[in-house]
Image: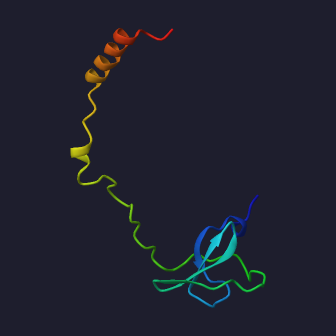
Amino acid sequence: MMSSVTTAVGWFRDPYARHEDRYFSEGRPTKLVRDGRRESYDPPPDLPLPGPPEPSRARPAPSPTAGDLRRADDAQREAVYDSRRACETATSSMVRFGAAR
């Protein structure tokens, strides 16, 4: 069974208490740190982890892709799918070019 230390990915409290949070990848602390909303780099010290990573207390920043992913002009760029028209197009192609054998 894998422990949470080996699977930790994302923001966790900085186990070295140098910053508020430190980013973990594959269970290892990285140089990416943050204090409030400010992110910077600070390589982790060459020390063993004092314990399992604690989840960050910071509220995650809103994702730029959260919510509606459609663009305002999508309706102008995309035709509505019409199954009847798709069948007619496929049938017409088969008549014109022959059916695959």
Residue farthest bottom in this picture? 18
54 versus 35 height, above or below: above
Residue beneath the point at 25% across and 37% down = 79
Q: Nearer the viewer, residue 33 or 58?
A: 33
Q: Position of residue 13 (x, y in %)?
A: 60, 81
Residue farthest front in this picture? 97
56 versus 3 height, above or below: below
Residue beneath the point at 41% across and 9% down = 98
Q: Position of residue 101 (x, y in %)?
A: 51, 8
Residue 49 occupies quadrant: bottom right
**Label tally:** 0
Residue 51 occupies quadrant: bottom right
Q: Is 68 left or right of 2, judged from the image as shown?
A: left
Give the quarter of the figure containing the N terminus: bottom right
Q: Is 83 left or right of 101, judged from the image as shown?
A: left
- The scheme the figure's colours follow is rainbow
60 versus 97 height, above or below: below
Q: Position of residue 10 (x, y in %)?
A: 58, 70
1 versus 82 height, above or below: below
Residue beneath the point at 35% across and 18% down = 90
Q: Nearer the viewer, residue 81 or 18?
A: 81
Q: Nearer the viewer, residue 2 or 33?
A: 33
Residue beneath the point at 70% across and 76% down = 52
Q: Is 49 left or right of 60, judged from the image as shown?
A: right
